[in-house]
Amino acid sequence: MNGAKTSNASRREAPRGRIDKRQAILEAAFRTFAREGYGQSCVREIAAEAGVAKPTIYNHLGDKETLFREAMLAAVGRTSGAGLAALEQLREPDGDVRPMLEEAGHRVLKNHCDPESQALRWLLNAEAARFPDLLETIQREGAQRLHDALADRLARFALSGRLHTSDPDLAAEQFLALLTGPMELRTRLGTRKVSDAELRTVGRAAVDTFLRAYAPRAVDAP
């Protein structure tokens, strides 16, 4: 009887263990691809990074191309989740807009400058010609989702009279550009770590410029 219970427990735990191992492989693969590039990476090196045997990777994910695709999709899932979380506080349009936008902008910038986010963008740029369909998918799951969520939040501010815009999609595009545009130069293409104070400075400047364009219009007295 006890043996049957043990057997049932083992079967329940097996899928969990397989999922955990797959996740460990994908994380190790992404680190290796980010460090070495797709062309210079090999499955043996990824297996060593993950602490598994080389055949284990083939059993879980097949060939190197599939491994790259899945590792990139897993990475964009993590980074886009953090980006969406940064906008969560804008869901309810209560209070002063400026500090809310500054805090959300700061969180977006922290995620944008996170090493995993930077590595993801670098790999996308480096391998766009080899994986054009993957580029489209990752942009849809990452940058487009962030843009759409921000447009939704800005539309709520506009409906409550806290912003003036009839095109929240354009407003979201411009706010994100104001936030992330300076970072390529400031990070020296991801080779320089930007301090938190500097991120806040960039965020405040972005909000200043954004509100000059989108703050509610004063109503002329009759």
Image (cartoon, helix red, strand yellow):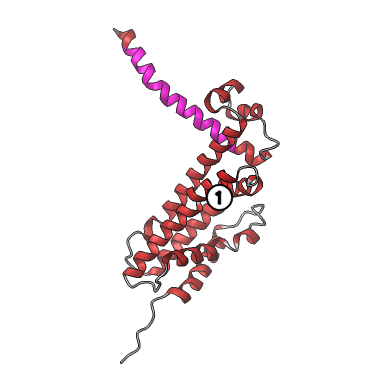
Look at the image and say whether residue 195 sits in the magenta stretch: no
Residue at point 44%, 64% (across, down): 169
Q: Position of residue 154 (x, y in %)?
A: 39, 65
SS at mark 1 in the image: loop
Above or below, comparing residue 96 to residue 3 in the picture: below
Quarter containing the N terminus: top left
Residue occupying the far front of the picture: 133
Q: Magenta stretch?
A: 5-30
Nearer to us in this view, 149 or 34:
149
Classify 10 Å Cα crowding around label 1: few (below 14), some (14-19), many (20 and above): some
Q: Position of residue 86 (x, y in %)?
A: 44, 55
Q: Position of residue 196 (x, y in %)?
A: 54, 58
- Tag 1 residue: 114
Quarter containing the C terminus: bottom left
Residue at point 54%, 34% (across, down): 26
Horizontal side, residue 190 vs residue 27: left or right: right
Residue at point 58%, 29% (across, down): 50
**Total residue callouts:** 1
Above or below, comparing residue 8 to residue 95 in the picture: above
Look at the image and say whether residue 28 sits in the magenta stretch: yes
Above or below, comparing residue 19 to residue 161 in the picture: above
| Amino acid under disc 1 | Asp
Residue occupying the far left of the picture: 1
Residue at point 42%, 66% (across, down): 168
Horizontal side, residue 54 vs residue 172: left or right: right
Q: Position of residue 31 (x, y in %)?
A: 60, 38
In the figure, residue 96 lies in which quadrant? bottom left
Nearer to us in this view, 32 or 127:
127
Main SS of the magenta part reads helix
In the figure, residue 153 lies in which quadrant? bottom left
Horizontal side, residue 34 vs residue 80: left or right: right
